[in-house]
Each structure stands twice: as structure tokens, then as C-alpha cells.
Amino acid sequence: MSMFAGSPKGTRLRQRSVLAVAVCIGGIVLTAAPAAALPDDMHPAGALLAEQPVTAAVLPVGAADASAVIRYSTLRTVTEIGESTGSVFLPQGAPPAGGWPVVSYAHGNVGIDDECAPSVTGSSDVEREFIEQWLATGYAVAATDYAGIGTDGVNAYTDGPAAGANTVDIVRAAHKLYGDQLSDRWIVTGLSQGGHATYFAAHQATTRTPELDFRGAIAVAAPTHLDQLFPLAGPNFPSVPVAGIAHYVLYTLAGLDDGRPELDIRQHLTPTGIDLMEKAKATCSNDLNEYLRSHPVTVAELFTTPLDTPDLREALGEMQHVPTSGFDRPIRVVHSLADTKLPIPLTWAQLAEMRSGDVYVEYQQLSGTDHADTLTASMPESLDFAARVLH
């Protein structure tokens, strides 16, 4: 575990340098807020609304047939109540005394259309292997789809408080379905977009589900500082060597267009930007990637005016600012030097800020591993972390 030391002034200077480097070489890839108050006629967070068996195509190797797809109440955006779907996978065999410990898994980018939901399509090969390893080691896995992917509205992409709540609330809903088959002890982990959600879930888990026993978090290849980078988007945004940057910008714009209409995001967009934003709402990640490869577009071509306005800065800060203090459980952070989708200097800055905020962080830095494969490459150390905090 590497540590960042030095005076507060020196730390601030390093953070500014890191962010400057990140802006030059990178872009957007993909807060924790308290749980929103619920109107009297709404379901409480994590209420189990429906359940059905998992289809054979979605069921991972090693999962019990009793595994289920569920619908549950949660946040749709940082400011709005909604619903999400997700899968709960039980290991095969009889549960141990006290029940199976639970891993809440937040998936990486799959797109935001309903057809993209992992509970419908199954997980990517990398994420399926990851889930199967948790099951084989004796953990139940609760895997949210995120609100808006398979439920009403457009997914609020990069809305951390909402995604974090989705990831926490599915654990409560899973306990309502499976009762004493599940232990109260649980952790959260996620890749990329899901790593971003993991930070927020970890920040709110203990207070959002006080009846459960949250133990820690593992954030893998997770974007941070998006609230500082996204306002730079505009007609003068430079061409940067980050894979798929327009792809991630479009999903974020689509979520803002649907969930935050008061911001009138369309006023900042070119006709091309509006057309592609609408396409992003109805296209899963792999298909959108393929379309943008054959119809390349720069971030600058999406915009008529910059996003650097007071209203947007406030909204993006509320959505995207990853907490740097106030965590009450250990956090494990993983990133690879070879990651071409998410510049690693952003993670270095996040680590420095969290350690300045007295957060207990374990850090694993890989080399020669690409973005998605960081998940399985770090699995042995992640299993060790889980064993230490859960037992």
C-alpha cells in the first residue's frame, strides 16, 4: 500500500499538478449525498417490489437455481425517487451458519437503454468471470442494473449519489427476499462506472442501511474528478488520446437531458450533438462504440457553447464529486498504468485527497493490464481484502 505524505500545501500543489496532467492527457470516462426524504406514499429505499427467476442465459456458473431478478425502490437521480432492477445470485449448496456474506456489484458501462440491463442480457465476459469467482468463494452477489436501465426514465449516467444508492438498496431488497440465507455482513465493489458508484455506496452504506453490517469497498478503475473535467467540454475541447471519450460524454448528456430538464442541456449542443445524444439513449455500449468508430466525432463537434455555467457546475458537483472524507470503512482502490480509458493521474489525485481526509485506503497499482481486465487481474488481492474485512 503506497502512501502520499507531506504538508497540506504540498499536497494541494501535487493535486493541482496531477489534475493538470489528467486534463492534458485524458478526458471524461465515464458525492455522496444523504438518502433523499421519501414522500409518505412512496416505498422506502430497498423495498422489494417484484421478483422472478433468473434466466439460464444470465445465470453465472456456480449460482444456485434459486437466484432471482428483482425490482426494488431506490433513487433515480440524486434528487428523485425511482426504481431499479438487478440480479441476486446465491452460491450453490446450503448457506453457512449466519448466511452467505454479500458482495454488492456495480457494473461497468453497458449503455443506458433498457435492453442493456445485465439482468436481461447477462454480464460481460470479464464481469461474469468476476461474479463467478465470488460465488465460488462463498459469497452471494447482488448486482444492480442501475435505475433507468430496465426501469422508467433514462439512466442518470455518472450521477454518483443515485448509482451509489442503487448499489446499497439492492442489498436491503435481497435480504427481504432471502432472509436468513444471507449474512448481514456485506461489501461493495465495481468496475469503471461501477467503481464511481462504489465510492458513493461506501460513503452512504452505513447510514442508508443501519440494520446491515457494511464492512468495506473495492473501487476498480474508477473515474474521479469528473465534476472538474466535464465543465471543460465545449466547442474548443481539444482532441485527447482517451478511448471512447465521446461515447461517455453522450451517455452523461443523455442522463442530464432526461433527469435534469431545468438545465436545458440541448441549448449547448449542435444538431450532431443532439442526434447522437438521442442515439445514445437507445443504443447499448458495444453498438454505440461500433457506430462511433464508423462515424467518428470529436467532443468539440457536439457543442455550440461550453458547459462551464454556474447551474451546470452546481449540478455536476452534486452528481459527480467523489467524496474524499467521511468514509467509515476501509476502501481498496485498484488501477492500471496501462489503462487507456481512464487516466491514472485522476486516481492518484483521489488517493492523495482521501488520505489527507484520514480515509483508510489500500491501493493496488497494476501495469500491462487494460481497463476491463483490471477487474480479474486484481481478484486475488480483492478476495484477500474481503476475507479480512468480512470475517
Image (spheres, grey):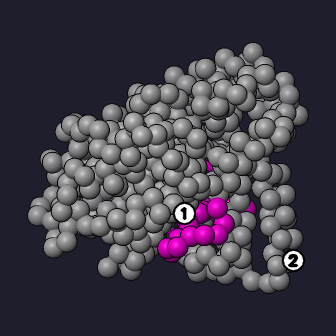
Q: Is there CB contact under 8 Å for labels 1 and 2?
A: no
Badge 2: residue crowd in 10 Å (few <14, some 14–19, many ≥20): few
Query: Is 337 covered by the magenta stretch?
Result: yes
- The amino acid at mark 1 is His
Q: Earlier in the sequence, mark 1 or mark 2?
A: 2
How many marks the image carries: the answer is 2
Q: Position of residue 354 (x, y in %)?
A: 66, 71
Mark 1 packing: few (<14 Cα in 10 Å), some, or many (20+)?
Answer: many
Considering every residue shown, the one lying at the far front of the view is 40
Could you tell me which residue is drawn at 58 percent across and 20 percent down? 279
Name the mark nearer the viewer: 1 or 2.
Answer: 1
In this rendering, is residue 84 above or below 166? Answer: above
Q: Where residue 165 sits: x, y (%)?
A: 48, 50
Residue bearing the label numbered 2: 9
Magenta-highlighted residues:
323-345
Q: Is residue 359 above or below residue 186?
A: below
Residue shown at the point (68%, 54%) measured from the top left: 321
Q: Is residue 110 visible?
A: no
Q: Nearer the viewer, residue 251 or 41?
A: 41
Mark 1–mark 2 Cα distance, whole angstroms, equals: 26 Å
Q: Position of residue 217 (x, y in %)?
A: 48, 66
Circle 1: element type = helix
Residue denoted by label 1: 203
Q: Is residue 271 above or below residue 123?
A: above
Instruction: From the viewer's side, name the closer residue of 284 and 292.
Output: 284
Q: Residue at x 35, y 34 (%)?
A: 121
Residue 87: x, y in percent?
Answer: 31, 45
